[in-house]
């Protein structure tokens, strides 16, 4: 079963959830603000995603901006970035869709259709 990790108040997450529902996908929903991804989960997802680690950051979030991460991230190690992401779910780009052999970060309908064969 897919894991759908989102922030319910986020409009992009709402669109993604509607897309999953409309396409009959089975998933377990998890609120990222109530249940923050752990360091081990983030490490695993990062490995599965094939994406640069910076793609996991919610760059439009208030926390990202207040911590001035745009200037700090380039100087951080992957370990430091993963620990930072694990410290607060609001730093993590969402929604996340996690399958057995893939991780999708953010909602791009074409990408989701391709992965789920919908």
Image: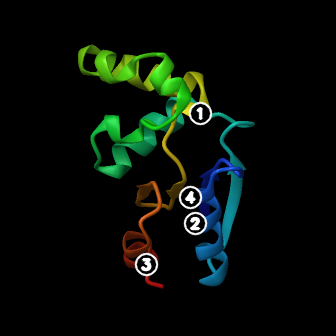
Whichever of labels 3 and 2 marks the residue nearer the N terminus, that label is: 2
- Name which residue lies at 41% across and 60% down: 101
Query: How is the protein colored in the picture?
Result: rainbow
Mark 1 burial class by Cα count in 10 Å: few <14, some 14-19, many 20+? many
On the picture, is 45 further left or further right than 34?
Answer: left
| Residue 17 percent across, percent down from the top left | 64, 67
Report how far apart the C-alphas of labels 1 and 4 lie in the structure. 14 Å
Report how far apart the C-alphas of labels 2 and 4 lie in the structure. 6 Å
- Name which residue lies at 46% across and 54% down: 106
The numbered disc on residue 16 is 2
Report how far apart the C-alphas of labels 3 and 2 lie in the structure. 11 Å
Report how far apart the C-alphas of labels 4 and 3 lie in the structure. 16 Å
The numbered disc on residue 12 is 4
| Residue 18 percent across, percent down from the top left | 65, 73
Whichever of labels 1 and 4 marks the residue nearer the N terminus, that label is: 4
* Picture quarter with the N terminus: bottom right
The numbered disc on residue 80 is none
Whichever of labels 1 and 2 marks the residue nearer the N terminus, that label is: 2
Above or below residue 67? Residue 16 is below
The numbered disc on residue 113 is 3
């Amino acid at each position: 079963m897919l894991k759908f990790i989102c922030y319910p108040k986020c409009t992009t997450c709402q669109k993604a959830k509607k897309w999953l529902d409309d396409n009959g996908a089975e998933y377990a929903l998890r609120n990222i603000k109530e249940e923050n991804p752990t360091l081990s989960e983030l490490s695993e997802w990062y490995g599965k995603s094939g994406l640069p680690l910076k793609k996991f950051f919610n760059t439009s979030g208030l926390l990202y901006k207040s911590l001035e991460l745009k200037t700090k991230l380039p100087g951080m190690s992957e370990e430091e970035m993963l620990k930072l992401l694990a410290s607060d779910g609001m730093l993590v780009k969402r929604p996340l869709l996690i399958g057995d052999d893939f991780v999708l970060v953010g909602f791009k309908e074409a990408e989701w259709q391709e992965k789920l064969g919908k």
